Amino acid sequence: MFIEINSIAQKNYFIHFTSDPMENPNAAIMSINAASEALKQGHIVTYFAAGDGIRILLKDVIKNLRTVTPLGGEFGKISQMAENLLL
């Protein structure tokens, strides 16, 4: 008898982002990373941007996230990751 216990049940995640990404870039980056990781693991994700958070959907904001956070470095890795995931 063989029982596999490694399977992970698919879950639904709702990520609600309301912060201005240029004023709170860490929240923007974390919300994008959380959504991306959940999708990679096979879960269903709804990413809802509201209020000032809708600015995360603007190309210019995404491309300039690196300018407002030390996590972006000088090469724009954070902006590139966000652009790949959102655009």
Image: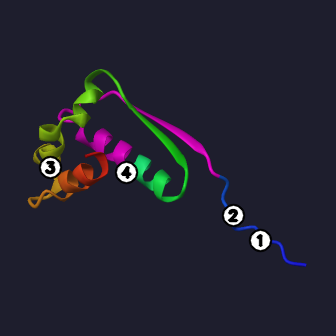
Residues shaded magenta:
10-32
Of callouts 2 and 3, the N-terminal one: 2
Mark 2 vs mark 3: in front: 2
- Is label 2 in contact with label 1 (beta carbons under 8 Å)? yes
Q: Residue at x 29, y 45 (%)?
A: 86
Q: Secondary structure at mark 1?
A: loop
Q: CA distance from mark 2 to mark 1?
A: 7 Å
Residue 21, quarter of the rendered image: top left
Q: CA distance from mark 2 to mark 3?
A: 37 Å
Pointer 4: what residue? 33
* Residue beneath disc 2: 7
Secondary structure under tag 4 reads helix
Which residue ends up furthest to the top in the rendered image? 51
Residue depicted at 24% across the width and 35% down the height: 57
Numbered disc in front, either 1 or 4: 1
Relative to 26, say whether 84 is above or below. Answer: below
Residue 31: say if magenta.
yes
User: What is the CA distance from the residue labelled 3 to the residue labelled 1?
Assistant: 43 Å
Mark 2–mark 4 CB contact (< 8 Å): no
Q: Can you tell which of label 3 and label 1 is closer to the viewer?
A: 1
Q: Is disc 4 surrounded by few (<14), some (14 to 19) or many (20+) residues within 10 Å?
A: some
- Give the residue pinned by disc 1: 4
Give whichever of discs 3 and 4 has the lower sequence position. Answer: 4
